[in-house]
Image (cartoon, rainbow, N blue to C red):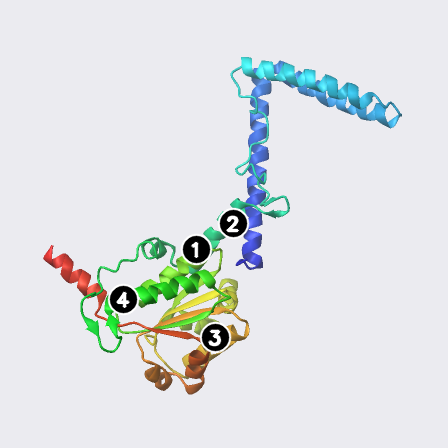
Amino acid sequence: MGLNNSQYNQVMREYEQQQLKNRYEQQRRVEEVYARVPQIGALDEEIRSQGARSARMALKGDTEAGRRFRENLADLREQKQVLLAAAGYPPDYMDMHYQCPACKDTGYENGRRCRCFEQARTRILYAQSNIRQVLERENFDTLSYSWYDGERRLERLGMTELDYMKMVVAKCREFAAGFPEKGRNLLFTGSTGVGKTFLTNCIAKALIDRYISVIYLTSQDLFELLSRYKFGRDLQEDTEEACRHILECEMLIIDDLGTEVNNTFVSSQLFYCINERILREKGTIISTNLSVGVLQDTYSDRVTSRIMSHYAAIPLYGEDIRVKKKNFRGLT
């Protein structure tokens, strides 16, 4: 789940390259042993010779050929192990060595994708999301409530800022754990610095850790990419593929909607992107400083209608946390 065809092929090419490397390194070790202990080379040649002779005898109807070969093979292998040990080599030195012994570097174990395949997939999804380093700092494990007021009860919330944020975080955790069955789309609203981007990053990290494909783009980057592709300013295959991923990835995060230069192209592309992803049953998270009313005035009724009918809105309140942190550092 989560990889398109080109990404899947990329993973499988990595396995093929690893297999070639395994064979090369095994051949190098074998040649090293043969050079130091020629008797082992002679034993391997005898094993191959007896195997071929046994096969010919079996074809001629000798039913005991296989049994005799297995007995001789055990003896020859024992001699080989004695010589290897005497030369200071471990018993498996001449065997094929694998980076992942479970699947023997094929990506599949017993017909199912191996754990190492999932690890490779996670690596690609993180790279694709554009925010790998950020997610290492901003995730549910690093989230802190220390910047939220737990004393003053806010009239518009009916609770303290701290209690409200705890409720919001619980909803975000539930969304990430239940995606996509329990909801696909979120809209974060609120002023600058109240935690919108941090929460989207928390969700992104949780989804990627579940091997769900996530693409993160600021609204400026999103519309710049669509513009380059739409107006032919960038005809590279990578740009075409990136635009396709925008529609096909399982979760698209559009951060800071409203900070881009707005025009009819932006409004039409925003509607197309949102509507197409709804039709394809893909998830989208939008964060914006704009209120719902301003969103409607800035883009169009149909954009706002699609958002309000298909997205769970989560308004955030409070003061700019970045300013609080800056002031705190200034006092220490």
Looking at the image, tell me whether mark 2 or mark 1 is earlier in sequence order: 2
Q: Amino acid at mark 1?
A: Tyr
Q: Please identify, in this view, whether the residue under mark 2 or under mark 1 is nearer the observer.
A: 2
> Can residue 225 be seen at all in this image of the molecule?
no
Judge by depth and name the residue closer to the eye, 77 or 320.
320
Q: CA distance from mark 1 to mark 4?
A: 32 Å
Pointer 1: what residue?
A: 126
Q: Please identify, in this view, whether the residue under mark 1 or under mark 4 is nearer the observer.
A: 4
Numbered label attached to residue 273 = 3
Pointer 4: what residue?
A: 163
Name the residue located 60 percent from the left edge and 17 percent from the top edge: 81
Q: Please identify, in this view, whether the residue under mark 2 or under mark 3 is nearer the observer.
A: 2
Pointer 2: what residue?
A: 118
CB under 8 Å between callouts 2 and 3?
no
How would you rate the neighbour count of disc 4 (Cα within 10 Å): few for under 14, some for 14-19, many for 20 or more? Answer: some
Q: Secondary structure at mark 4?
A: helix
Looking at the image, tell me whether mark 3 or mark 1 is earlier in sequence order: 1
217 up-or-down from 144: above or below: below
Q: Please identify, in this view, whether the residue under mark 4 or under mark 3 is nearer the observer.
A: 4
Residue farthest along the right direction in this orientation: 61
CB under 8 Å between callouts 4 and 3?
no
Residue 42 appears at what percent x and percent y? Answer: 67, 16
Q: Please identify, in this view, whether the residue under mark 2 or under mark 4 is nearer the observer.
A: 4
Name the residue located 28 percent from the left edge and 68 percent from the top edge: 164
* Corner quadrant of residue 323: bottom left
- Taking 324 as reference, is 68 left or right? right
CB under 8 Å between callouts 2 and 4?
no
CB under 8 Å between callouts 3 and 1?
no
Name the residue located 29 percent from the left edge and 74 percent from the top edge: 190
Q: Amino acid at mark 3?
A: Cys
How would you rate the neighbour count of disc 3 (Cα within 10 Å): few for under 14, some for 14-19, many for 20 or more? Answer: some
